[in-house]
Image (cartoon, helix red, strand yellow):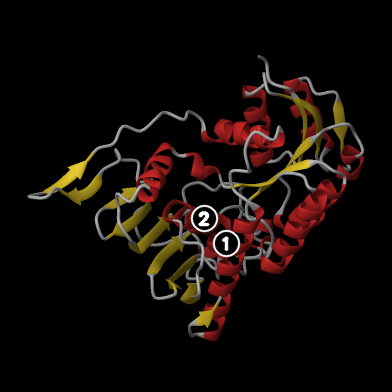
């Protein structure tokens, strides 16, 4: 039996909005891209032409008055709160790009709006779709790892400050640097896979070793570039710290847009019975033991294909009432509270409660 096709709209057609459009197009048996919106008319025309979209808007409020049933919100961070709340009040299901908001206070307002609207709100935590993450999460739930006592989250770019001088590096527009931009993914994945959703305190520091002097910054390429030397760069380029989950577990993290280190990307999970390193572009290996020997397990990992395509499928399924949203708004609020606490701790120079 064919599934009910959902009319979707996309608000914001920059790089990530285009990725959402491609994901919906790849799931055309489940949805129709019925409307697109961006403040730049040329983007609207280009995406609409590519995907044969009839509804074309430069004002998101007009799109929300159309007959779309669901929207992807892919605008800049400062607009996440007003656009997503407006969409929920218009009774649209919402797939909201990360970070959920500029801070936890705004995220809580979005959560309230979703509860009042009784519509789906899914946060776009696309790394949850990774096959390794799915396998390890299930193994942890099944008790294979025993009690989880520590997690290491490392995401370091040697030179990866995006759009220097633009909105990415302007705290008033972005909310912060790599912590809120990419660290938000690693925090979410750490808590999602381990099941630890009660961070209680954090001691952290942030640094701007590269960001403080835009003209001196040396790089090979720049996402969302080239740099705007007449712009602002007042966010961190490196964040590190230790998160406590009461007396049960800890999470250490290093998140950097730029550092004099090789590129690194991994999430280590340490359990009493087993441990693992995730998302390091290597085959999944579980470090454990048998009754008589130290041993490694190499689980078979299902191929989930393109993670953005898979994310769109989970969102559409939630819109049809077949499952809950894959990354909930309540979890998004916890993530934002943790990020807020990291910035507070760095500013105060001491451990703070979450």
Instruction: Tell me where residue 150 sits by quadrant.
Output: bottom left
Q: Who comes first in sequence, dot 2 or dot 1?
A: 2
The correct choice, above or below, for 132 with respect to 27 in the image is below
The residue to which callout 2 is attached is 188
Q: Is residue 224 visible?
A: yes
Which residue is drawn at the image coordinates 78% and 47% (left, top)?
118
Question: Residue 335 got which mark?
Answer: 1
Left or right of 231 in this view: 42: right
Which residue is drawn at the image coordinates 66% and 65% (left, top)?
175
Which residue is drawn at the image coordinates 63% and 43% (left, top)?
325
Asked whether 66 or 57 is in front, the reply is 66
The quadrant of the image that shows the N terminus is: top right
The correct choice, above or below, for 28 with respect to 274 in the image is above
The correct choice, above or below, for 196 with respect to 347 in the image is above
Left or right of 39 in this view: 135: left
Instruction: Tell me where residue 166 sits by quadrant.
Output: bottom right
Q: Is residue 166 visible?
A: no
Local SS, label 2: helix
The quadrant of the image that shows the C terminus is: bottom right
Position of residue 132 measured from the top left corner of the image (x, y, whole percent): 38, 40
- The 10 Å Cα crowd at callout 1, few under 14, some 14 to 19, many 20 or more, is many
Mark 2–mark 1 Cα distance, whole angstroms, equals 6 Å
Position of residue 23 measured from the top left corner of the image (x, y, whole percent): 62, 30
Position of residue 239 measured from the top left corner of the image (x, y, whole percent): 47, 68
How many numbered badges does the structure rendering display?
2
Local SS, label 1: helix
The reply to whether dot 2 and dot 1 touch (C-beta < 8 Å) is yes
Which residue is drawn at the image coordinates 29% and 38% (left, top)?
283
Position of residue 242 measured from the top left corner of the image (x, y, whole percent): 42, 72
Left or right of 62 in this view: 272: left
């Amino acid at each position: 039996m064919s599934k009910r096709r959902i009319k979707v709209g996309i608000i914001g057609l920059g790089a990530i909005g285009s990725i959402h459009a491609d994901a919906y197009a790849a799931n055309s048996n489940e949805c129709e891209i019925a409307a697109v919106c961006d403040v730049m008319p040329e983007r609207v025309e280009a995406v609409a032409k590519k995907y044969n979209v009839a509804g074309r808007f430069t004002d998101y409020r007009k799109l929300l008055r159309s007959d779309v049933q669901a929207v992807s919100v892919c605008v800049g961070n400062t607009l996440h709160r007003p656009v997503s709340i407006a969409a929920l009040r218009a009774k649209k299901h919402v797939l909201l790009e990360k970070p959920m908001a500029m801070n936890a206070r705004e995220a809580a307002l979005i959560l309230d709006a979703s509860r009042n609207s009784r519509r789906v709100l899914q946060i776009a935590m696309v790394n949850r779709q990774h096959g390794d993450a799915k396998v390890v999460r299930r193994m942890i739930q099944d008790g294979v790892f025993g009690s989880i006592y520590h997690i290491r989250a490392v995401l370091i770019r040697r030179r990866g400050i995006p759009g220097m001088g633009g909105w990415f590096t302007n705290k008033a527009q972005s909310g912060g640097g790599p912590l809120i931009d990419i660290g938000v993914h690693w925090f979410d994945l750490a808590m999602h896979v381990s099941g630890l959703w009660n961070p209680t305190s954090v001691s952290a520091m942030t640094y701007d070793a590269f960001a403080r002097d835009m003209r001196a910054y040396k790089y090979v390429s720049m996402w969302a570039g080239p740099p705007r030397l007449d712009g602002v760069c007042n966010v961190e380029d490196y964040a590190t710290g230790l998160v406590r989950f009461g007396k049960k577990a800890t999470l250490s993290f290093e998140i950097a847009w730029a550092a004099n280190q090789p590129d690194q990307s991994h999430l280590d999970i340490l359990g009493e019975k087993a441990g693992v390193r995730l998302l390091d572009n290597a085959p999944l290996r579980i470090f454990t033991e048998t009754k008589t020997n130290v041993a490694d397990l190499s689980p078979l990992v299902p191929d989930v294909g393109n993670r953005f395509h898979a994310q769109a499928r989970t969102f559409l399924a939630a819109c049809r009432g077949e499952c809950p949203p894959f990354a909930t708004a309540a979890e998004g609020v916890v993530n934002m509270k943790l990020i807020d606490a990291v910035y507070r701790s760095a500013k105060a120079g001491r451990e703070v409660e979450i």
